[in-house]
Amino acid sequence: MSYIADSVASTIALYAGLIDEAAWSRPAVEQLGLQATRLLDGHRRCEPGAYVELSNWLPELVGCSAEWIWSVNISEDETRRALARQHGYLAWATVEASDVRPIAMFECAVGAVLAGELDELERLFHKAPELATMRSHFGHRATLLHYLGANGVETYRQRVPSNAAAVAAWLLSRGADVGATADMYGGGQTALGLVLTSAHPAAAGATDELARVLRG
């Protein structure tokens, strides 16, 4: 079981059909381009997930009310910019310049982390122990440990497993680097810093135990 905030659930619904295993074969520019088009359509339809994405990731609309966001015109260039920022890129041009593709094993491991599936992680790490320090192909370059912060990564992946602290401890025992930094929010972000500044672990009641594990 994982804690999934309503805001996160609404983005999962917004991108339905685009964020399944088929996404693991697409380079970032293709994947985020598809999501940007869906986000633009979601804005036109006043879908809750579009409000979450735009109010968090498009600078001009951060903190604005839903009524205001629905009233303004949005272009696909703007939804691309929002998706670029969400995934740790400085601009859409940076996404276009990247030809890095996802690694299916890592993407599968992210899913296992967020679901708290230690048996599945064991199976994956038996095949690829380097998953402990591997990073996302997206611009934020998050490790598996960073994803437990539910902060600064893909909105639809900002979930907190009920056994989050146990997952963190398991990853650390397999070689994950607690001091590794990722590039969201301007860079230099540790897993602990993300946990302490994220609303999702707090709402799930997981912050204190997660922080204890990460502090050692």
Image (tube, helix red, strand yellow):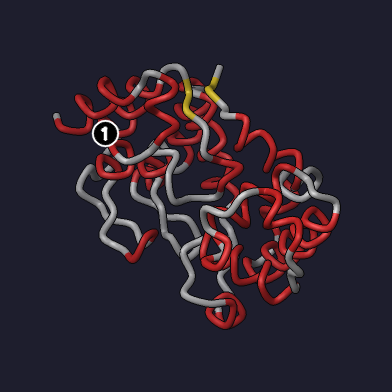
Q: Nearer the viewer, residue 75 or 137?
A: 75
The C terminus - image quarter: top left
Q: Specify the farthest residue to the left.
A: 216
Task: Name which residue lies at 48% across and 32% down.
Answer: 113
The residue sitting at 66% across, 72% down in the picture is 78
Q: Is residue 133 above or below residue 62?
A: above
Assess disc 1: are there few (<14), some (14-19) or many (≥20) residues with their C-alpha within 10 Å of its C-alpha. Answer: some
For this rendering, which residue is in front, 136 or 16?
16
Relative to 206, 193 lies left or right: left
Give the residue drawn at x 68%, y 56%. 68
Q: Could you tell me which residue is drawn at 24 percent across and 45 percent down?
A: 177
Image coordinates of residue 73 in percent, x first then y, are 76, 69
Viewed as shown, does residue 127 lie left or right of 11?
A: left
Query: What residue is pinned by disc 1?
Result: 172
The answer to which quarter of the image holds residue 99 is bottom right
Is the N terminus in the top left, top right, bottom left or bottom right quadrant?
top right
